[in-house]
Amino acid sequence: MTADRHAELEQVFQPHILVDVGGELPDVNPVAAQAACEELSLWLLESFEPRWETVTPNPGGTAGHHAAYLQAKTEWLRRYLHTDRRDSPEAHACLDRLQAFWREWAGYQLTAGPA
């Protein structure tokens, strides 16, 4: 796979990193949740490194790791709104889940063809 194709897939993946999960917290002010989620999403975007060397073909889709990533991001957001600590165990768990989702997603793109 070419460097151009890698860059293209990394761009296509970016909205998955930036997804807003603030609506999953009904007990929280939606404006505060959205603002915090945007901040956390930007931290993830800056911290995320797409590691192509860990990607393997995946014909099975991405639902499992995608759901785990969204759950981790929601838990991190909940904790962040109550503690105002961006760097936390939840942050690192979310980044780990994002990496797992990336490997699964990119592997699926390798198997399924163009995104």
Image (spheres, rainbow, N blue to C red):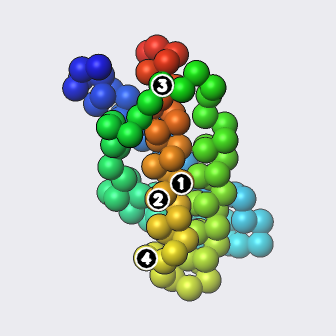
Q: Residues within 10 Å of mark 3 (few under 14, many from 20)?
A: some
Q: Quadrant of residue 58?
A: top right
Out of 55 and 13, give the one closest to the viewer. Answer: 55
Out of 76 and 29, give the one closest to the viewer. Answer: 76
Whole-percent x, y for residue 10 in the image: 36, 35
Mark 2–mark 4 distance (CA, rounded to whole Å) = 11 Å
Q: With respect to residue 28, does 98 lie above or below? A: above
Type of the residue with mark 4: Asp
Type of the residue with mark 1: Arg
The residue indicated by pointer 4 is 87
Q: Residues within 10 Å of mark 4 (few under 14, many from 20)?
A: few
The residue indicated by pointer 2 is 95
The residue indicated by pointer 3 is 57
Residue at image location 61% in from the left, 43% down from the top: 66
Whole-percent x, y for residue 15 in the image: 47, 41
Mark 2–mark 1 distance (CA, rounded to whole Å) = 5 Å
Residue at image location 48% in from the left, 77% down from the top: 88
Q: Quadrant of residue 76?
A: bottom right
Residue at image location 58% in from the left, 21% down from the top: 59
Query: Any mark on residue 97, and which?
Result: 1
Q: With respect to residue 15, does 26 lie above or below? A: below
Q: Is residue 97 left or right of residue 114?
A: right
Residue at image location 63% in from the left, 26% down from the top: 60
Q: Secondary structure at mark 1?
A: helix
Can you see residue 12?
no
Whole-percent x, y for residue 37 in the image: 53, 62
Query: Which of marks 3 and 1 precedes in the sequence?
Result: 3
Q: Are marks 2 and 1 in contact (CB under 8 Å)?
A: yes
Q: Is residue 90 left or right of residue 71?
A: left
Mark 1–mark 3 distance (CA, rounded to whole Å) = 18 Å
Q: Are marks 4 and 3 in contact (CB under 8 Å)?
A: no
Query: Which of marks 3 and 4 precedes in the sequence?
Result: 3
